[in-house]
């Protein structure tokens, strides 16, 4: 049987190379952003002109040999007063107007809270409240690199 030992890797060189790659990636992203700026600005000016044309002609769209341009409404609705909005939803039983999301940090704190029963777990430590019903939990370990 052949000797299958792992090759020795210089971790210092590996981390240095990682930092170099990350710096090059960031520099490339910044360069691309500045290289794209004239195109983005040009497109914005053309979009403003085309939208003005649609408004002036009271049209929703217009077709040319090169392509079609049309109006599209983008809507943004944000919460101005959370408590007022929640009260409205509760009082009118309009839960379909809400989007419930998990507050990850608060759920993690809840999970680590000692169970008020005072019971001990198999490890002899106080039991914790654990994951609230209806949620899934997944944790992954990844490596992070910090420059010296």
Image: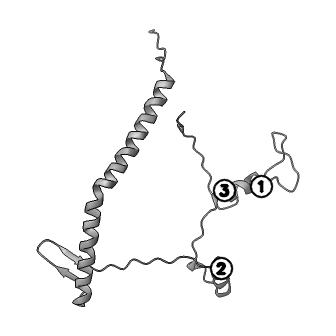
Lower sequence index among marks 3 and 1? 3
Q: Is residue 110 left or right of residue 51?
A: right
C-alpha span from label 1 to label 2: 27 Å
The reply to whether dot 3 and dot 2 touch (C-beta < 8 Å) is: no
Q: Image point 43% across, 40% down: which residue? A: 22
Residue occupied by mark 3 = 105
Image coords of residue 18 (percent x, y): 45, 34
Give how far apart the Cα atoms at labels 3 and 2 are.
21 Å
Label 2 packing within 10 angstroms: few (<14), some (14-19), many (20+): some
List x then y, in percent, for residue 121.
82, 44
Q: What is the quadrant of residue 95 in the picture?
A: bottom right
The reply to whether the C-beta atoms of the residues labelled 3 and 1 are less than 8 Å apart is no
Q: Check residue 86 in the rendering and tell me which mark sits there, or answer none.
A: 2
Please tell me the numbered disc located at residue 117. Answer: none
In this rendering, is residue 123 above or below 128? Answer: above
Q: Is residue 57 above or below residue 132?
A: below
Mark 1: secondary structure: loop
- According to the image, label 1 marks what residue? 129
């Amino acid at each position: 049987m052949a000797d299958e030992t792992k090759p020795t890797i210089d971790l210092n060189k590996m981390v240095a190379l990682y930092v170099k790659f990350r710096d090059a990636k960031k520099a490339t992203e910044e360069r691309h952003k500045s290289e794209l700026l004239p195109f983005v600005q040009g497109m914005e000016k053309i979009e403003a002109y085309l939208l003005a044309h649609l408004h002036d002609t009271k049209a929703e769209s217009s077709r040319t040999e090169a392509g079609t341009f049309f109006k599209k409404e983008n809507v943004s609705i944000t919460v101005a007063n959370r408590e007022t909005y929640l009260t409205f939803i509760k009082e009118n039983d309009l839960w379909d107007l809400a989007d419930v999301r998990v507050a990850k940090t608060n759920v993690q704190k809840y999970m680590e809270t000692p169970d008020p029963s005072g019971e001990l777990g198999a490890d002899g430590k106080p039991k914790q409240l654990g994951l609230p019903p209806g949620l899934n939990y997944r944790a992954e370990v990844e490596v992070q690199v910090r420059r010296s």
